[in-house]
Image (cartoon, coloured by chain):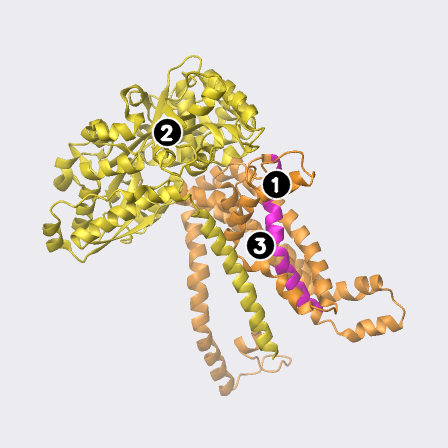
Chain colours: A yellow, B orange
Amino acid sequence: MKHRRLLVLAGVIGAIALIASLSVAAASSNRPAHVQQAAAVAAPKVPNAAAIRKKYGGQKITFVGDSVGNGHVRDVALAKRFTKDTGIKVSVTPHPAASDAAYSQLARAFSSKSSSIDVAMIDVVWPGAFAPYLVDLKPKLGKQSKLHAAGIVANDTINGKLVAMPWFGDYGILYYRTDLLKKYGYKAPPKTWADLFKMAQKIQTGEQKSNPNFAGFVFQGNSYEGLTCNALEWIASAGGGHMIDNGKATINNAKAITILDAMRAQVGKTTPRGVTSYQEDQTEHAFDSGDAAFARNWPYQYGIGATAGSKVKGKFSVTTLPHGAAGKPVGTVGGWQLAVSKYSKHKDATIEFVRYMTSPAVEKFDAITNSNVPTITSVAKDPAVVKTNPYLKPAIASVARVTRPAKFLKTHYNEASKVIYQGINQILNGTPAKNVLPGVQSKLNQILKQK
Amino acid sequence: MSSVATPTPAPRRRGRRRRTKLQRRQTRLAWLLLIPALAVVAFVAIYPLAKTVYQSFTNQEFLAGITPTKWVGLDNYSLIWHDPAWKHAVILTLKFAVITVSFEFVLGLIIALVVNSKFKGRGVMRAVMLVPWAIPTVVAAQMWKWMLDDTFGVVNDLGVRAHVLSHSHAWISDPSTSLGAVAAVDIWKTTPFVALLLLAGLQVIPTDLYEAADVDGASKLQQFWRITLPLLKPAILVTLIFRTLDALRVFDVFYVFFGNRLDTQTMAIYIQSTIIGDGHVGLGAAASVFMFLIIALFVVIYVTFMRVNEE
């Protein structure tokens, strides 16, 4: 008897714990319905499918793919199509949403020579660090790589080896609510950061009367790779350099201090106080639920906001990010490549998958359904693509691009970026920039000397 | 346990008697039976520890092929010793351990005393109190992170409605409340475990002691100080050791709450981010050795205290 009661109790506790776990898991995937619809346009056919099926049909490969926005939905749709056409089974695993965590995951797999990953998406700043673990794609995909923007191909070529294929590009842009700008008497989006803060304040004060959760401005302030990208835009657009210039850390300068302190002053004023833990998804949620007037994000957010069912559909537009008093607008270069692991047991089948994923047809599909920036120049100019993705218009796409200092840091990039984003996050959380930046600068110089 | 596992010595007499054949055979058998257990311990505990200590004297990198691994002596230890971030991590972890263990102990003891007394629905209470402990830490932490959120969190919503809070507060982002927030979640989650261990201790105290005390006219408070607490001491010590060690190597709650934030790095997060994020295995190993020593220090203190008490 006693045992049975104990068993029942254990069962009840277990059930409660399970329910709690499941509801947390469910909540995290509880995205608005319109987000799931994006893959409604059919994925393009695989060219030469019959020949591929004959050679590699039945093989199984694993793709570590996207997890931000609609990325995973797109990956699954494309993988399904590829499997259907070629008979190569692709299992898709989303990587961690924070890019530095995704880096660690791959580093673990490579250092243990694991064959569990065949193909992975890698950030534009990683080819240097991962090159020894990646297959040279030049023999098989060299021809296709010529379709892609030469700058990105050069970035993905290490010591003459094409270690990754460009997949989609990225640069930071400003999202703004056209309806609210009109409502509060503004004719154009802000040109400078000071304008943005002023407008954000006015709109926020007005909107909070009916929506207490409304914020003027949202961005990626969490202590992670995305903050390095955001901060690079702030500092470079204020004329404060690129954190590391000519192989020396330059982040500790008066212009950087001014702009970072200006941002710090906005935290909890025109931004939610919690913005210091926001990543891309939180930014997109805030803007697309109609809770923000301005947002800094990558182009992928455009597609989600413009889908039927979004609360801001038809009410927002994009432009270049604002600049500081003594600067010009810039956008941090982001973007993702596909790379094949040296430890893969099915390299040839995997390369066929990469060939498909980085083909013009797929890039066009991705640009139209997911508003990702095509890396293939002809696709980026395709009128159908430009029509759905206004950020590709020359006025916005020609913004000065700034790159994170990966080329000076090579294998130490991740470590240096951590020093940067931890320092900036500390500033946003309340520490004056002049107390933080000297330490960041000397640490960066230490890391630069390590090579 | 020990009487089964170790060779039984012959009854002690003055001077060593020559062992009989049977005894020798028994000793041999005992060692033979011990070999599997010793091998497992050597493999899962001694080997990794020794390897960590070895790595801490090298400049080994996580991704091989970047730099050739070589012996660097005490360089790693000196780097860690002089790193303000490590110092901060140690102090933060110690603060966290002191706060959480003391709250968990006091609350756990109160709960254990309550559910040890006789009342209707005691069985249900004992089960219900365990629910927080049954939820995986990462899940509980994520749940609390959302509940404490400054824009959609239920804690702020209720607080503002009840006029306890004047405005929504970013409990997790704000450095002045972040340690409190994470400690509260740990206390919420782990108090049931402490209560359970202490309850087990309470149940072995013979009831006739209390009956005798009642007859002698001792008040309930006197009974608690004179009977319950002294007899509970072994259980208390075990609980404190468990909890302190757990708190000192905390990783999950902090990682879910703050990720890679600098001012909220615990020792374990510092080590993880040094090895996996930065790729410095040698440096991280040196930090691990420091962490091992700090935890060992606490064990020594507790065990000495326990021994002093036994004598």
Most distant residue in the right direction = B217
Of the residues shown, which amino acid type is indicated by label 2? Answer: Leu
Of the residues shown, which amino acid type is indicated by label 3? Answer: Leu
Q: Disc 2 on helix, strand or loop? A: helix
Instruction: Report whether residue A164 is seen.
Output: no
Q: Identify the magenta region.
A: B176-202
Mark 1, residue position: B157
Q: Disc 1 on helix, strand or loop? A: helix
- Quadrant holding the C terminus of chain B: bottom right
- List x then y, in percent, for residue B166: 67, 34
- The disc numbered 2 marks a residue on which chain? A
Task: Say left or right for A327 vs A119.
Answer: right
Tag 2: Cα neighbours inside 10 Å, few (<14), some, or many (≥20)? Answer: some
Q: What residue lies at 87% left-to-right and 64% top-to-bottom?
A: B219
Instruction: Tell me, yes or no, whether the highlighted magenta stretch contains residue A169.
Output: no
- Looking at the picture, do discs 3 and 2 lie on one chain? no
Q: How much space separates mark 2 and mark 1, taking CA atoms?
A: 47 Å
Residue depth check, mark 1 versus mark 3: number of the one nearer the observer: 1
Q: How much space separates mark 3 and mark 2, taking CA atoms?
A: 37 Å
For the residue pair B168 and B307, the one nearer the viewer reads as B168
Instruction: Indicate which disc residue B245 carries.
Output: 3
- List x then y, in percent, for residue A417: 40, 33
